[in-house]
Image (spheres, rainbow, N blue to C red):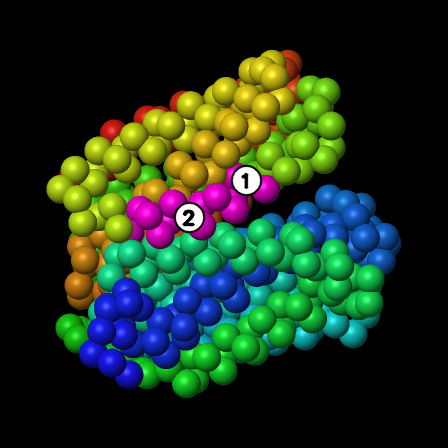
Amino acid sequence: MSSTAPERWGGIGRRAAVGGLGVGFAAGWNIAALGAIATRLSHAYGVALGTIGLFVTVQFVMHMAMQIPGGRAADRWGARTSALVGLVLIVAGNAVSLPAPHPALGFAGRAIVGLGTGFAFVGGSDYIRARGGSPFLQGVYGGGSVLAPGLALALVPVLAGWEGFRAPYVSAIAVACVCILALVLAPPAAPAVRHAGERLDAGFFRDRQLYRFAAIHSASFGFSVILGNWVVTLLEHHGQPRGAAAAAGSLTLLLGFFTRAGGGALLRRPDAARWVALSLVAGGAGAALLALPLPLGVLVACAALVGLAAGVPFAMAFTGAAAARPDAPGAAVGFVNAWASLAIVAGAPLVGLTFSLPGEGRIGFVVLGALAALAALATPR
């Protein structure tokens, strides 16, 4: 390998970059694998569509609960080891759901998958940091985690023609196994140098800087997932065709792939904080505009604005959190991501409830938009 090869891969070697990026992709695939064929799964399991939604809720609750423990595991064991544990749990959880379409197996499998994504996502991000990856590569890592569910939405329905209800599980196992191989071939990462085995002190949870990073991550990634889950329903309730509504919904996640990488490169600029704050205001405006009776083309553009804006703060949130707590960088990233997961777990049903209020969901979108814009005030400088 030439001396310039590591730089082309964001400051680290090719094997380390591929292994680290694969972890985020494998974790992200499980976000949307079930939702891609939710109606088909409800028929196979013999349950209401809402029960399939609860499968995903269980996964996210476990994912949220494992963020800080997953980060501490990366600090203590080394990020590659903790990420491998997460990938193995993802394989195991999906395997639990393979034998038959029984709800008990579905719930148990998603709970194990949530444990795995909690370990894997934080471990993969910390692996890139520990190997010396640049903020740009950290942004690419985050971009892969939202590109993966977009691809799952497109490919799992095709696979379902052969595998039926097993399609989400088989595809997730295949993706995770490929990424396990890539990570095994990648070089290891050392545990956090300082006090890697100690408990987190109270000062960690009083660190205002971490809450700032958590606020911008929750108001960008967290809110984009909530909006992506409900924008199709919102547009359909207000007279837009299903195909156009679905296309608009996909933009709230897929476009973040490009701006997460761009947000990493943005950190080289001295005015990066201004651009991150502006992205939060722009994303909030896009969410609020989706609630208005605008032409379809304008609504699609607003959904695209939400997706593009949501990716910008990612690299600042993760890179900044790790740098703010060099004694526990993995735990710091987990802490920030846990708040975004909590926003999704709590916010998705709350926005759903607003569909029973006047405006049929519009109130929820306006409130999210206002909160995202306010989060701009928390942007670390």
Q: Is residue 257 on the magenta stretch?
A: yes
Quarter where residue 138 is shown? bottom left
Image position of 266 (left or right of 55): left
Residue at the image position 24 percent from the left and 69 percent from the top? 7
Q: Secondary structure at mark 2?
A: helix
Residue at the image position 29 percent from the left and 56 percent from the top? 136
Tell me if residue 275 comes above or below residue 154 in the rendering.
Answer: above
Quarter where residue 24 is shown? bottom left
Residue 255 coordinates in the image, percent (x, y): 48, 44
* Amino acid of disc 1: Leu
Q: Secondary structure at mark 1?
A: helix
Check disc 2 and report the residue beneath it: 258
Is 330 or 253 nearer to us in this picture? 253
Residue at the image position 67 percent from the left and 53 percent from the top? 154
Residue at the image position 64 percent from the left and 14 percent from the top? 358
Residue stretch in magenta: 250-264
Label 1 CA crowd tier, 10 Å (few <14, some 14–19, many 20+): many
Check disc 1 and report the residue beneath it: 251
Label for residue 181?
Answer: none
Residue 301 coordinates in the image, percent (x, y): 52, 28
Q: Is residue 261 on the magenta stretch?
A: yes
Magenta segment's dominant SS is helix
Residue 48 coordinates in the image, percent (x, y): 80, 46
Q: Quadrant of the N terminus?
A: bottom left
How far is disc 1 from disc 2 in space, using C-alphas? 11 Å
